Image (cartoon, rainbow, N blue to C red):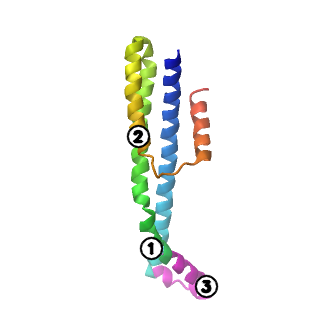
Amino acid sequence: MQLRTAIRNSMLTADLNVRYWGYISRRYYKTAMTMKIFLVIMASGTVASWGIWQEIELLWKILSGIAAILSIILPILRTEEKIDKTSFLKGKWIEVKNDYEFLWDTKENKNLNGLTQEYKRIRDKETKVSKKEKNLPYRSMLIAKCYKEVLKSRGL
């Protein structure tokens, strides 16, 4: 019975991680796109020629300053790299989740030894994926949100 509980809990954890890294990846993507769009708009000569800026010159100077700072900071933030890494993690967690779900669905057809071996194989895969999460954000409130989503989606 303990092995079945471990498989079930691991499956739920993998589901949580799929959701978590999906949210993180989308957040990085939206942030990067917002910053890029802002920079494109501010770099446009057309925007600079709008008559409204003559009336609120201070705002134009502030926005131009922000754009200059963003253009320097954007490469340092490495958002594209983080988007790639978090998207990769989501994909790997989907694989792990699918493996656990298949194991859970077929557990009645396997003997204890076969079930244990397959569980260990998936756990090893999960460990490798977890190691790739290094230097990426840990958002406890988002994890709690994902946890609730997993429970709700599985009727728990």
- Above-or-below relation of 71 to 30: below
In depth, the one of 26 and 137 nearer the eye is: 137
Q: Which residue is mark 1?
A: 72
Q: In the rendered image, which residue does mark 2 sit on?
A: 129
Circles 1 and 3: CB distance less than 8 Å? no
Q: Pointer 1 and pointer 2: residues touching (CB < 8 Å)?
A: no
Query: Circle 3 sits in a helix, a strand or a loop, which is it?
Result: helix
Give the residue displayed 42% in from the left and 13% down from the top: 112
Q: Amino acid at mark 1?
A: Ile
Taking the magenta stretch, the answer to whether it contains residue 16 is no
Tell me the crowding category of disc 2: few under 14, some 14 to 19, or many 20 or more residues within 10 angstroms, Cα based: some
- Give the main secondary structure, helix, strand or loop, of the magenta stretch: helix
Inter-mark Cα distance, 1 to 2: 32 Å
Secondary structure category for the residue under label 2: helix
Write the residue at 50% across / 70% down. Answer: 38
Q: Position of residue 63 (x, y in %)?
A: 55, 78
Nearer the observer, disc 1 or disc 2?
2
Between disc 2 and disc 3, whose residue precedes? Answer: 3
Q: Amino acid at mark 3?
A: Leu
- Quarter placement of the C terminus: top right
**Residue under the image location 52 percent in, 80 percent down:** 64
Q: Amino acid at mark 2?
A: Val
